[in-house]
Image: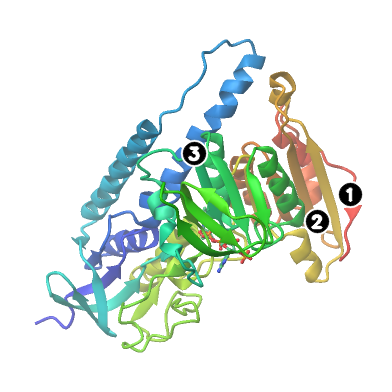
Amino acid sequence: MAEFDVDLFVIGAGSGGTRAARIAAGHGARVMIAEEDRIGGTCVIRGCVPKKLFVYASRFADEFEDAAGFGWRVGKPEFDWPTLRDAVAKEVTRLSGLYRKGLDGAGVAIREERAVVTGPHEVKLQKSGQTIRARHILVATGGYPAFDPPIPGGELGISSNEVFHLPSLPKRMLVIGGGYIALEFASVFARLGVAVTLLHRGDNVLRGFDEDLRTRLRDALGHAGITLRLGCTVDRIELLPDGTRRAHCAHGAPIDADVVLVATGRRPNTAGLGLEAAGVKLGPAGQVLVDAASLSNVPSIAAVGDVTDRVNLTPVAIREGHAFADSTFGGKPWTMDHSLVASAVFTTPELGTVGLTEQQALATGRELRIFETGFRPMKATISGRDERIYMKLIVDAQTDKVIGVHILGHDAGEIIQSVAIAVTMGATKADFDRTIALHPSAAEELVTMRTPRKSAL
Ligand code: NDP
């Protein structure tokens, strides 16, 4: 009998796990993957993909309004929630099917049930009771929405998992949190016509992002009709006889809403997974502690993606999974560089960022040159929309290297992806300057900024 049933057992068929499984199988490994929910994981099933489709839906509100300024006469637009909800659900099912097809095509055995680690080389499938001996185990179980600490009535709120399936569009929504998920959904639902209140414990949104963008985004969200309650926490939520959720705040009036969306962060999904019993060290948030090669302290057990709580973004999980599979089964060891990861927040206006913020750059002791510009996009001049774009370059004064780029405005995510190539290559401000502008575009401003301001703490 062979010592191991499989070379690799992957727990979790999300972005990171699926990539690792497919690449490992491509290197000739015998791979099995277990998924207790739907194949595709957070990003495909209840995250990035359905969220972005909601974002597209929400932005038609602006488009209808803009069109009038350009001479179009359209009837009064009406929005039908079930049409959007069901179309998005259908697309998610299609994508989940493609993920399954990809795994099948690569020769990966799929087990649609929960798997628990029972030893450094052993996994037990919970439904079938089957025990699998694996040369390597990869934990790619992602995260789950957390509401910590729990408050009385917290169960009256929903998380981003449920928000895609609301039976009807609420009239009033309370969103708790000031991070990616809270802001994106506040922005989406406000544009779909919902009266949104955003309540956040901090005095500004998106902690950790560049201050100039945070402030401008906060103001833009207020301008878009979102009621901001900052510096405030919810003590308890109460259910009124008519179904209203009443959130009582530490100070100020209570807030009534039909739906309370709690978006106060996510936690690594390791509870009950058997990792500690197998000797795997977990961090304080329950994350699997791994080295640069994504290996835990137990050499046969690795982990990638949100369950490791490094940079919790889909493309990062994919890259980590790919590196693990190449290194372990392909004889080509390499590690993922987490230092320069572009990201976007799909609010309206959108935020795109890569590299250091001004505050982070200053903390390194560098002398900086900061270039910034704010302008009204060309389209808004005719449509009459009160819309602005803000761009900022952080330049190391000594090396002339562009070490941070931050954009708030239309297509910021699309623009930042291209700029991230230049920043990853180590482009200098002189490189930006000798790049010919593409006119007329918003992105041309990135290569035409000439007058720096100094920056100091
Ligand atoms: P974030 O960590 O981004 O934000 C959590 C928010 O909740 C913060 O504003 C935080 O406040 C607040 N918070 C945390 N604990 C409490 C508490 N006990 N009471 C009140 N407020 C609290 O998490 P999200 O859930 O928004 O997103 C999870 C991760 O998913 C993100 O970090 C990101 O990596 C990823 N993501 C990426 C997206 C993208 O790329 N566009 C979209 C969505 C998610 P404070 O700042 O004070 O800590």
Residue 114, position as x, y percentages in the image:
23, 68
Residue 368, position as x, y percentages in the image:
85, 60
Question: Which residue does the numbered mark 1 point to in the structure image?
Answer: 452
Image point (43%, 38%), residue name: 169
Image point (86%, 63%), residue name: 398
Specify the amino acid type for callout 2.
Answer: Val
Q: Which element carries disc 3, helix, strand or loop?
A: loop
Question: Which residue does the numbered mark 3 point to in the structure image?
Answer: 171
Which of label 3 and label 1 is nearer to you? Answer: 3
Picture quadrant where residue 53 is located:
top left
> Which of the image's four quarters has the N terminus?
bottom left
Specify the amino acid type for callout 1.
Answer: Pro
Q: Which element carries disc 2, helix, strand or loop?
A: strand
Question: 362 above or below 442?
Answer: below
The residues bearing labels 3 and 2 have C-alpha atoms spaced at a distance of 46 Å
The residues bearing labels 2 and 1 have C-alpha atoms spaced at a distance of 9 Å
The answer to whether the residues at label 2 and label 1 have Cβ atoms under 8 Å apart is yes
Specify the amino acid type for callout 3.
Answer: Lys
